[in-house]
Structure formats: C-alpha cells, structure tokens
Image (cartoon, rainbow, N blue to C red):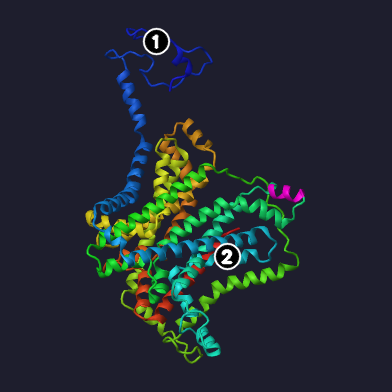
Amino acid sequence: MASSSSLLAPPRPRSSASAPAPAPAGRITPDLPRGTGGTGGAPGGGSAPAARRAAAARWDGLTATRIVLWGAVAALVLVPLGAIVSLAVSGSGWAELASPEVLAATGNSLVSAGVSGVLAVLVGTGLALLLERTDLPGRRALRLLALSPMLMPPFVGAIAWLSLLGPSSGLNTLWTGWFGAPLWNLYGGEGVVFLLTLHSYPVAMMIVTAALRRVPADLEQAARIAGSSAPRALWEVTTPLLRPAMLSAFALVAVSNLADFGIPSIIGLPERYTTLSTLVYRFLQSGTVEDPLAVVSAIGFVLLLIALLGVVLDLLRTRSRVELDAQAGAPAPLPLGRARGLVAALTAAAVLATTLLPLVTLAMQALLPAPGVPFTPETVTLESFERALTASGTLTGIGNSLMLATLAGVICGVLGLLIGAVVARTRARGNGALLGVALLPQAIPGLVIAVAWLVIAPRVGLANTPWLILCAYLTSFLALVVQSVHAPLAGTPATAEEAARVSGASRLRALWDISCRMAVPAAISGAVLVGLTAVRELTLSVLLLSPGSQTLGVVIFNLQQAGAYNASSALSLIVAVAGLAGLGLTARAQP
C-alpha cells in the first residue's frame, strides 16, 4: 500500500520510465511491488503485473476460505429454508391449515410454549438471584443439581415423571387408597406445560446468571449507601437490568418448546392433547392428508415467519440496549438472616424433588418385570435391562446415535472454529451476514428444520439415509460452536495476529496459527456440547426416520409407544445416568 505522501504527490509524466528516486537516509519506504512506482499504462510499464498482483492479493487463501464457509453455511441453512419456502408458497397445503385439528394443535403449541417459557424464566431468574446474590449455603451443589434437568433428554424426563405421577404409579395408587382420587394425573396439557418448564428453566437460569454477573456492583452499592436495604437494592436496581436477558431467555425457551416432540407425544397424546410437532409426525406417518409434505411445509413456513419476526424484534431491541460490563467485584451477598436455613432447606427440597426423585422412581420401575408389580426385594430383577438391550433395533440405534453425534460434533467443531475466527478476526463486508446466517437456526424450531430437510432430501439423494439426520443435526447445532468460538475471540485484542503479519505471515497463516489455535479449547467444548445434544435429540430423528436410521431416542420412544414401559425405563435410566456422570466430570474439571 502506498504511503499518504506518495498519494498526494503530482503524477509523473506518462513517458517516464525511469526508476523512482532513492529515499533519503533514515526514511522507511513502503514495500511496494515492482512496477508500482509509476502510473503509466504504456507497454512494458508494469501496471498490468501490478494489477495481477493486486488481484492475487485479494484472492488469497483467506478469501478462498471465506467462500468455502459461505458455501457450507448456504448449503446447511439457506438452501433447506429456501426449499421449504418455495414448496409452501407453490404447494397446495394452505387449505389444510384452516382445519379444526391444525387450529387446535396450533393453539395447544402456542399455549404450552408460551406458558412454559414464562414459568421457566420466573423459576430460572429466581434461582439465579438466590444462587448468585445471597449467602445461601451449598450454592455450588445446588447450582449443579438445578442444572441437571438440562442434561436429561426431555422424553426421558417424561418417562421418569410418569413413573412418579402416572395413573398407575405407586404414589398415585397410594394416594387413591387414602383419599379416593389420584394426587395428579400427569397426562394432558398441564403435564406437558409442567415438564416443558422443568426441562427448560436451566437454560433461562444460565442466561440470567450470565447477565447478573455483568451488572456493575457499583449500582447496588450506591443504592445501599443511599439508604436502600439490600433486598430493595436488588429488586429496584439489579432486577430491571436483567429484563433484556429475561426476554432473550423467554424467546429461546419458547422457540425450543414450540418444536418439542418427546414430551407432548408421551404426555399429551394419551389425552388427545395434540401439538404441531405430534400432528406433523402423524401426517407424515399415516398419510391422513392428501399431500403431507405440502401441508407440513405450509406449517413449517408459518413457524419460520414467527421465528424470523422474533429475531427482527430482538435485533431492534438489542440496537437500543446499553451493554453493561462489571469491572468491579460482585456486591456483598444479600444476607438471608434467620431465614437462611429455611430458605436453604426449601430450595434444596424443591431441587431434589424435581431432579433426584423422578430418577429414583425411574430406577425402581426399571428394576421391576412389569408395571403394577410391587417393589420388594423378591420382585427386583434385571430382566427389563436385558429386554431393552436385546430389543429389535436397540444396538442399531445406539450405534447410529454414537456415529451421528460424533460426526456432528467433529464437523460442527471445524466449521464453527473457522466461522468464529474469520468473523471475529478479519474485516469484510459479509462477516456480519455470515455470522447471522450461521446463528439463525438457533432461533428456528427444530420442527421447521426437519421439514426443510424432508423437502430437499429427494433432490440431493439423501432420502431414506441416516445422512439426512446428520445434515439436520449440522443445521441445528452449528450455532453452538460458532457462539463458543466467536465470543472469546471478539473480546481479545488482535495484537498477536498483527505481529505475525508484520513478520511476513499471510492473512490465512496468521489467522490459523494465532486465532484458531487460541480458540481450539472453545471449539472442543462446543463440539462436545453438540455431541451430547445430538445423542439426546428426538424431534429431528423421529421426523426424519427411515429404515435402519433409528437413533437411541427413537428406540426409547418406540418401546414406550409399544407398551414396554419397564424396558423403556431401563434404557432411559442408562441415558440419564450417563448424562449425570458427564455433569459430575464437568464439575470436577472446573476450578
């Protein structure tokens, strides 16, 4: 690049072909390519080689990498979504949207997603405030227990809670004998909302906790100095600053719950409580409508519009939001005083009742040979585990889940690492768009992504193959790694890359040797999260199911639907224990 003095100098005559004058002693001249000293275009002048070198500089390895990343993101996100929009607009499924069953399923989905989203945010915010801003004893252990429902697949949690509050559960049987009616029948819409809340409040808790740690401590301290009590300062100063995080948590939880299949299918369908996810599954499996793909595409298109509207509103709200970053330490914890022991006991009881109690009843049911058999030392058996592991498709499902989860983790890890590094460490007009497209699927219900890949599968040769499920996994979970990589890199100075460039490294080499290596731990963490999420996933797997491509979640779902409740409980217990073991290892690895 020429210096500013050379740009302001008068142009040399076109006929001049002499070499530029040497620079004065002690003056550093820019390292210009040969032939760039003149402006002439005469034959043999050097402007053509300079133009070729400039073009080569523009089309270096980094540019090629950016093009490849755009191609991958377009193939995984834009093409499937474009296909569902195209089929929905040109298809014949719109008339079916006005049918009573679609309208009823839409209402049930909106109510269950909205109510569970509000409840999850309230519970998550309350726990975040208790565990972060009070002197509650045992906060670390309570925090781990409160997060444990997130590690258990929702459909496994539904089976666990059925063993506790199902119509034939021991608790309801005992309660009926005492009072003449069951304590609570979990089946139906209320049970769906309850379990959706239970399995999504940890997400809200994590989002609000992260925001709570960024609230400057000076604000609360100033309020206390001005005469406010600690509870009043917390309520009037800190809580209003958490509203953006609470709204973001509600949007994320509501979108996720809107597309959940496991809980509505296990808890809702026995009472004819149909949601859009279970209705789409029925349309695809039974063919009760004339053109199932066109109908589900129209449903997916409507949900896509709702999700995009939420994204736009969130962007508009974010543009006018002031970011807070805590530079001082956290304020002194709110003393609970005499209520400290009572609050700790109530919190521990609530957390244990919603986490460990269902697991205990799930284990008891898994150790019995059949439903309704009393739990005694004589009736305890491992037959249910044997039936579950030897059932048709179980080993295939386990193998498919491990294979697809591993591939999804590795591919998302590599793509997410490159996308996060390129967007955070380079300057280009398309960086914001690349990041936005890569993160878009996290705001789109999984139901829409599954339908989108169903539409495009026959055109790309993926129909009736397990690779269709893998593609849907990549679309859904890529954002997890991109966020893990982009956030730390965006907040780190790029001085190391600049030093590498000064030393002669290319843009791509500096990016790879410095930024990518720095972000490898974050990418690995994101990839592991992708793998764990893929193993516990059910909505995408069951909607994209084909012969020989069943996953572990589908196997458990089929056992439950076939009435093999004890076998499904045994397999569910294995999955739940594996998730809790992962939580324990993660907790031990933390400082």
Q: Amino acid at mark 2?
A: Leu
Direction from residue 188 to residue 88 in the image, left or right: left
Is there any visible trace of residue 339 in the rendered image?
Answer: yes
Separation of marks 1 and 2 at Cα, in angstroms? 71 Å
Q: Which residue is mark 2?
A: 144
367 left or right of 551 in image: right
Give coordinates of residue 204: x percent, y percent.
Answer: 53, 59
Residue beneath the point at 48% across and 92% down: 378
**In this rendering, is residue 404 above or below 43?**
below
The quarter of the displayed image where residue 146 is located: bottom right
Residue 11, numbered circle? 1
**SS of the residue at dot 1?**
loop
Q: Is residue 125 left or right of residue 232?
A: left
Q: Quadrant of the N terminus?
A: top left
Q: Which residues are magenta?
A: 219-226
Q: Position of residue 503 (x, y in %)?
A: 48, 31
Count of numbered tags: 2
- Helix, strand or loop at disc 2? helix
Horizontal and vertical percent position of residue 114: 47, 61
Q: Is residue 61 above or below residue 248?
A: above
Residue 401 visible here: no
Q: Nearer the viewer, residue 512 or 231?
A: 231
Residues at circles 1 and 2 in contact by the CB criterion of under 8 Å? no
